[in-house]
Image (cartoon, rainbow, N blue to C red):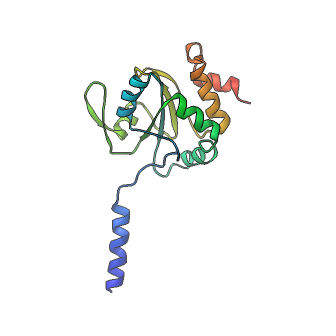
Amino acid sequence: MSQILSRLLCLFMFLAAPSYADVAEGYPFVAFDEGLRLAKSEHKPLFLYFGRYGCTWCDMTNKRAFVDPEVRRRYIANYVLVYVDTEGGRRLQLKSGEWITEAELGARLKVFATPKFAFLDADGKLLGATSGAKKVADLLAMDRFVSDKHYQTTTLPAFLRDELP
């Protein structure tokens, strides 16, 4: 009887522990508020990755696109990388001084499905956004969209339609 109780207690502790969203391995992702500060000081745009624990499409993107060495090199060199768990309870401080959770940030930015990717300039202005699972070619094209400043003349979805087969 005590062995069953012990196993149930272990199971309960496992299920009650906070779970975090999966993030692409090998990337220096930071919280949103820290990312805004770093973008200002490093004069880099932000790459926002909105995901959540158990997101099949996030996992697919992590395993088939973020593992690419060229993607890793470009994204680490060119952006401040921010990961937002759209179901997360981590508290963030906005530029206004207001404190909200990652889940509230996702709701405010109308992230209703994951993964969603967005690029912001160092002042927090949206440069472009797209949703859904991505391949290596998608992430490289998304980098070109920002690096080559195509956001000045078109939207990210339109750019991707024209760039990708």
Q: Is residue 117 left or right of residue 103?
A: right
- The answer to whether 27 is drawn above or below residue 2 in the figure is above
- Residue shown at 74% from the left, 30% from the top: 165
- Residue shown at 29% from the left, 36% from the top: 100
In this rendering, does residue 117 appear at all? yes
Using the image as rendered, state which of residue 96 and residue 147 is in the foreground.
147
Residue 135 position within the rendered picture, expressed as x and y whole percent measured from the top left: 65, 39
Which quarter of the figure has residue 105? Answer: top left
In this rendering, does residue 130 appear at all? no
Residue 146 position within the rendered picture, expressed as x and y whole percent measured from the top left: 56, 22
Using the image as rendered, state which of residue 101 and residue 95 is in the foreground.
95
Residue 110 position within the rendered picture, expressed as x and y whole percent measured from the top left: 43, 32
- Locate the N terminus and report the quarter of the image it occupies: bottom left
- The answer to whether 69 is drawn above or below residue 125 in the figure is below
Which quarter of the figure has residue 62? Answer: top right
Number of numbered discs present? 0
Using the image as rendered, state which of residue 145 and residue 105 is in the foreground.
145
Residue 32 position within the rendered picture, expressed as x and y whole percent measured from the top left: 38, 34
Q: Is residue 112 left or right of residue 162?
A: left
Name the residue furthest bottom.
1
- Residue shown at 62% from the left, 24% from the top: 144
Q: Is residue 69 left or right of residue 121?
A: right
Using the image as rendered, state which of residue 142 and residue 162 is in the foreground.
142
